[in-house]
Amino acid sequence: MDLLGIVSHRFPLEQTPAAYTLNEQYADNVVKIVIDVAQT
């Protein structure tokens, strides 16, 4: 099952607070966010 189609936003680990704020407010047509710990 390909779940990448439901990911609407990606954030690096250091932007986790912004990701949670976006998700909490349902802003910018957010569906699902991914916090990518591999990005630097």
Image (cartoon, rainbow, N blue to C red):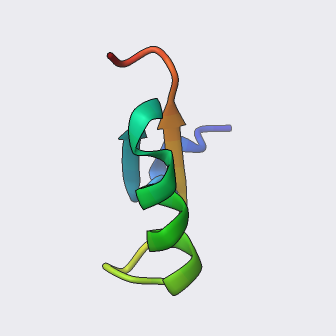
Identify the image quadrant of residue 1.
top right
Q: Position of residue 2 (x, y in %)?
A: 59, 38
Using the image, determine if residue 29 lies above or below residue 16. below
> Would residue 3 appear left or right of 19 to someone viewing this image?
right
Identify the image quadrant of residue 22.
bottom left
> Would residue 6 appear left or right of 30 to someone viewing this image?
right
Residue 12 versus residue 3: which sits nearer the camera?
12
Using the image, determine if residue 25 lies above or below residue 7. below
Please tell me which residue is depicted at 50% across the width and 55% down the height of the picture. Answer: 17
Number of numbered discs overlaid on the protein picture: 0
Image quarter of the C terminus: top left
Q: Position of residue 21 (x, y in %)?
A: 49, 70
Using the image, determine if residue 27 lies above or below residue 34. below
Please tell me which residue is depicted at 36% across the width and 19% down the height of the picture. Answer: 39
Kindly tell me whether residue 34 is visible in this rendering. yes
Kindly tell me whether residue 31 is visible in this rendering. no
Using the image, determine if residue 11 lies above or below residue 20. above
* Residue furthest out toward the right: 1
Q: Position of residue 19 (x, y in %)?
A: 46, 57
> Would residue 9 appear left or right of 20 to someone viewing this image?
left
Residue 26 versus residue 4: which sits nearer the camera?
26
Q: Position of residue 37 (x, y in %)?
A: 51, 22
